[in-house]
Amino acid sequence: MFPVGLSFCESVWRLLLLATDRRFHFTMPSENLRWETLEALKNSPKGQVTFDPYWSERGEHILAGCKETPSLSSHSAVILERIDSRSLNKSSFLDSSSIDFEEKPASVSSSESTADLNSKISALSSAPSLKNQPKDVSGSLPKLSDETRGESPEADVSEVPAPPSPPAISLLSPRAMETAGHIIRFQKKQQEKAKVALQERQVLQEKLVESVASTELEHLKRFEEMKELKQRQEFQSIRDMIDRETKESMGRQEKLKEEQRHRIKILNLRVRELEQQRHREAELEKQRQAEGRERLRSLNSIQEEILQLNQLLEPSAQANAHLPAASLASHSLRGNQLCSQVSEVVRKTAEGEFPSVEDMAVAERALCEMRSVIRQMGEEADRVQEKKKKDQEQEEERRKQEALQAQQEAQKKAEQAAKEKELRKGLQNNAEESTMKWYKELQNSAAQCAQSFEQLNSPKDAQTKKLKLELQKAATIPVSQISTNSGSQLREIFDRIDKLLSGRAVVSGGKSVSASQHPQGLEFVAYKLAEKFVKQGEEEVASHHEAAFPIGVVASGIWELHPQVGDLILAHLHKKCPYSVPHYPPMKDGTPVEEYQKILGYRVDDCGVEGQDSFLKRMSGMIRLYAAVIQLRWPYGSKQGSVPHGLNHGWRWLAQMLNMEPLADITATLLFDFLEVCGNALMKQYQGQFWKLILLLKDEYFPRIEAVTSSGEMGSVIRLKQFLETSLKSRQISPPKGQLSATFWRS
């Protein structure tokens, strides 16, 4: 067995050196021959044998290369030829055998005679090669069988066949024998080393197998753990999926329940709606029955009234005694025809049905026509009677004329004397002549306006009557809606009134109406609008003093755009409150007390004359409205022309009030209300002159007011006195409460 990692040539080289050191008696001719020998050995088949450490991986036996028979190269004869013949004789034992340096010696025939050296040399030169040539280390080591892999290393080594014992050779010398013994010992040592290496390799292999087995066992454990983890994860994912599906199914169930509840709710609503519809239909049916019965009662009452009116048309009636026979016969014929029409309608309802709306319209038209016939007949009777009365009155008129003339002359003398007395005192009982002339012109203008729409104000047909009501609502409702809520609302109301007065269509009560629908519509709307403005001052401003400013600014703006409305406002104001002129109407002879109180502004009805507090409250509201109108101007107007009725009229009114004798209670009330609303504006406008007037009022005129006021009527006097003292002391009059600011118009 060769040392591990050494080739055959190297082993031979070491043996040759060893033999040289042991003093083998053969010498080389020169040093170069040694190298040639080694080159020859290297190129021999045994020289190519190398140890392969990977024999176990290929399954070969570790001693496979030791079982082959080694042989020398054919070039060994050249070496022997060069050896000295002396040396050959001494080592002739080498001619008969070839030493195997790896596993076992090869046998060579030694039958030749040692005496003949030439034959020895030729025999050696012609010695045949061994049968089996050496192989690679990889091929020389056969694979171990499967049966021997599991056994112990000692068993493997024991089973390797031992090398055959060397053949008998001729011992030529003791030194040769010693060399052969060394070679044998060397072989044994190599075998021992091979066994030890094999055992170590087997132990290493076992350790490697154990480590691989432990590693694989750990891998198996990790694989089982990973598999178990995957199973748990799959189980958890399945559980999560089941939970999710459960939640989804529960959600779907809840959704289905909610949808079911919703459907039930809808069905209940539908059932309720159907029930309500049934109730409504029942109510409508009841209402229809009630309306039908009501129409039937109305029809019966109409028939009864027509029959009663028809009796008035008979010639035997006392009222018809003065009528001509022809006129009475025509009226009676028309009455009978109208009675027949109503009877025909009643006959239709005798079958159990209720009269329709058309039937009622026919019956009402017949009733209206019957009433008109009666009215015409009455007018004819009145005309006849009036004609008779006129003749009688003319006689009486002539007799009264003379008495009246005498009375007027006496009255004129008395008035002239009173005027002279008043002039001597410095105060008057009436306004100036120019003021009275202006007052009468306004009243005449209002009367003419009222006469101009007489046909619309007293309509004869239903359509005109309906139009009148719609126009009246369109004119009065916006004025009633004036408030201090916001400036935008006030502007909207103003635009609506302006459209109505301009003849354009406006919406009132959900219907479109226009003053141009009737020839007298504009005059009617202007008259009713002015009347409503004054009425708002009489009622709304009297209860809420701050309302004077929004109503006044709208009235001022309308007055500026439509002057006719402003004149009508003044006419209505002067008629209801003559103190706004100012004018104290005198009581004429023969005038009833109630009629004179109406002229002074009191309300007189069936219950009598209104109380003094109510009267003062109404007068106060109208004076406050007038004081607000003269100082305000519509902020969205042109502002180019002059104010139609400004502060100069307020200054005139205040001056004329101080030139007239004061009246108990009313004078103090009106002066206080007027100065509280308009005093600040007059102070800014007239400054020093205004304070002179206030001082005159306090020092000279106020004592006259106290002189005519009784002790039970001192409330208004005290308020006026406090106002005058405070104003003169501070030389300042505060702005009135409720005055519209710039913030209000932006709202």
Image: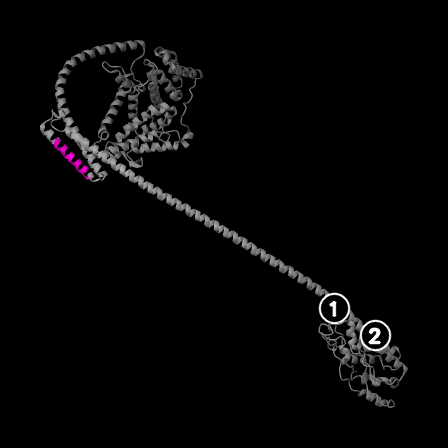
Q: Mark 2 points at which residue?
A: 189
Residue 396 lies in quadrant: top left
User: Is residue 368 positioned above or below 279 on the image?
Assistant: above
Circle 2 residues within 10 Å: few <14, some 14–19, many ≥20: some
- The circle drawn on residue 84 is none
The quarter of the image holding the N terminus is bottom right
Which region shows up in magenta? 332-348
- The secondary element bearing badge 2 is classed as helix
User: Is residue 280 positioned above or below 420 on the image?
Assistant: below
The amino acid marked with disc number 1 is: Gln
Q: Nearer the viewer, residue 281 or 708?
A: 281
Q: Name the residue under label 1.
A: 205
Q: Which of 737 and 295 is in front in this view?
A: 295
Residue displayed at 31% across by 41% down: 281
Residue 239 as seen in the image, left or right of residue 607: right
Among the two numbered marks 2 and 1 on one chain, the one whose residue lies closer to the N terminus? 2
Q: Check the image and tell me how it is coloured.
A: one colour
Residue 35 in picture, x, y percent from top left: 81, 79
Residue 645 lies in quadrant: top left
Residue 558 makes an appearance in the image: yes
User: Is residue 49 positioned above or below 371 on the image?
Assistant: below
Residue 425 lies in quadrant: top left
Residue 160 in picture, x, y percent from top left: 78, 77
Q: How far apart are marks 2 and 1 (CA)?
A: 24 Å
